[in-house]
């Protein structure tokens, strides 16, 4: 491993970890990224709404590979400031995805190029529901992005190419009963009991595997929170649950809503709150195939929602590829390895230069 590069990437990652950037508070880190790029002679611009763009406005004739990373993190869990460890960096967002941002910045400063041009896109509010993301408006404001031949959405993938992504549907599941005194429960109708029956029925459904373009995605239903109760001596007349449904490519948003309603039928009432479509599966083509070869392949499915869906909706081919380990994302002890940072940097650099 290149020790000098490893040190530089780890120090850059720690620098970014130590700038708090929970969703909706990305202004400071966006300004920092812009300042670092400008100080290094990189033609970067403030693209508005806490977004920074470099390398997309004056492209040449070579293929454009756009590296995309979100600036925000989930809320802190007593894991900021970060720290250098013996083999990497620990701290809030180290894996998801300030290690990726460090790789992007260092590649931009190195002016890596050859067979491909590299562009850079830093944006915010990705950790919020997709309706709040700054990416879709940015795609509309920055026409140069649409010309990208491939986007590497640098989500945590442990340096494996992961194609597509799941759709993400969220709903409130409401259960009604009749309140009453807990000493005489036979005179009431317990909404929590109705909720429990509905949740049990949904939990009995086994995950279903779907193969799309040769990749297997898993369709899953989950209840992620429940709420109910008035007092310890009151039978509640109302209770609610939050339902999260992840659906594979090949199932559209309208069909997904129908599938969720069918899964919950006979138990309570559903109110759809958000529905982010699944992402287009780009698992072939010269650039993807070359990146797969450089990363050691094979292509994997992305068992999560990521902004590749938003790029796909804009007809921009995108795959997931980043140094973070998915198992480290959002953990209190989140970390990213130095070797993973170096591997990501070198793979993308070789993709750009055409090196082996």
Image (tube, rainbow, N blue to C red):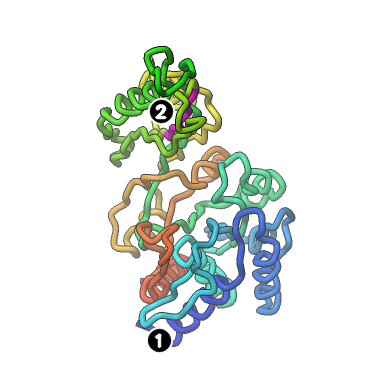
Q: Which residue matches tag 2?
A: 251
Asked if the residue under mark 2 is in contact with the one under mark 1, i.e. CB atoms within 8 Å, the reply is no
86 lies above or below 264: below
Q: Quadrant of the C terminus?
A: bottom left
Residue drawn at point x = 70 percent, y = 73 percent: 35
**Mark carried by residue 3:** 1
Nearer to us in this view, 36 or 246: 246
Q: What is the distance, in whole Å, between disc 1 and disc 2 at their CAs? A: 46 Å
What is the magenta segment's predominant secondary structure?
strand
- Relative side of 281 to 308, left or right: left
148 lies above or below 59: above
**Residue 69 in sight:** no
251 lies above or below 122: above
- Asked if residue 243 is among those painted magenta in the image, a careful observer would answer yes
Please tell me in which quadrant of the rendered image residue 118 appears.
bottom right
292 lies above or below 341: above
Q: Which residues make up the magenta segment? A: 238-244
Nearer to us in this view, 139 or 116: 139
Q: Of marks 1 and 2, which one's residue comes earlier in the chain?
A: 1
The image shows residue 133 at horizontal and vertical percentages of: 61, 46
Please tell me in which quadrant of the rendered image residue 136 appears.
top right
**Mark carried by residue 94:** none
Q: Quadrant of the N terminus?
A: bottom left
The image shows residue 60 at horizontal and vertical percentages of: 62, 61
**Would you call the spot at circle 1 few (<14 residues within 10 Å), some (14-19), or many (20 or more)?**
few
Please tell me in which quadrant of the rendered image residue 42 appears.
bottom right
The image shows residue 27 at horizontal and vertical percentages of: 70, 62
Q: Secondary structure beneath disc 1?
A: helix
């Amino acid at each position: 491993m290149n020790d000098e590069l490893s040190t530089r990437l780890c120090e850059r990652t720690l620098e970014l970890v130590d700038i708090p950037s929970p969703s909706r508070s990305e202004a400071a880190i966006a300004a920092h990224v812009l300042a670092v790029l400008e100080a290094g002679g990189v033609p970067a611009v403030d693209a508005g709404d806490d977004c920074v763009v470099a390398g997309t406005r004056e492209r040449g004739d070579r293929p454009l590979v756009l590296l995309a990373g979100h600036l925000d993190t989930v809320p802190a869990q007593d894991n900021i400031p970060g720290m250098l460890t013996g083999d990497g960096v620990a701290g809030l967002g180290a894996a998801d995805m300030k290690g990726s941002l460090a790789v992007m910045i260092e590649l931009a400063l190195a002016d890596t190029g050859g067979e491909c041009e590299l562009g850079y896109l830093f944006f915010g509010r990705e950790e919020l529901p997709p309706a709040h993301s700054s990416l879709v408006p940015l795609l509309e404001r920055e026409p140069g992005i649409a010309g990208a031949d491939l986007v590497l959405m640098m989500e945590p993938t442990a340096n494996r190419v992961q194609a597509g992504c799941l759709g993400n549907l969220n709903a409130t599941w409401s259960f009604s009963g009749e309140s009453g005194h807990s000493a005489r429960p036979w005179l009431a109708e317990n909404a929590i009991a109705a909720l429990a029956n509905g949740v049990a029925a949904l939990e009995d459904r086994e995950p279903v595997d779907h193969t799309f373009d040769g990749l297997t995605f898993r369709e899953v239903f989950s209840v992620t929170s429940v709420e109910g109760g008035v007092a310890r001596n009151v039978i509640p007349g109302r209770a609610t649950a939050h339902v999260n449904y992840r659906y594979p490519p090949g199932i559209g948003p309208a069909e997904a809503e129908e599938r969720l309603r069918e899964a919950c039928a006979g138990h309570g009432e559903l109110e759809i709150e958000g529905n982010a479509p699944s992402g287009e599966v780009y698992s072939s083509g010269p650039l993807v195939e070359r990146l797969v070869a450089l990363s050691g392949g094979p292509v994997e499915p992305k068992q999560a929602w990521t902004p590749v869906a938003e790029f796909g909706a804009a007809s921009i081919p995108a795959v997931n590829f980043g140094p973070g380990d998915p198992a480290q994302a959002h953990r209190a002890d989140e970390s990213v390895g130095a070797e993973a940072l170096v591997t990501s940097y070198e793979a993308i650099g070789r993709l750009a230069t055409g090196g082996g």
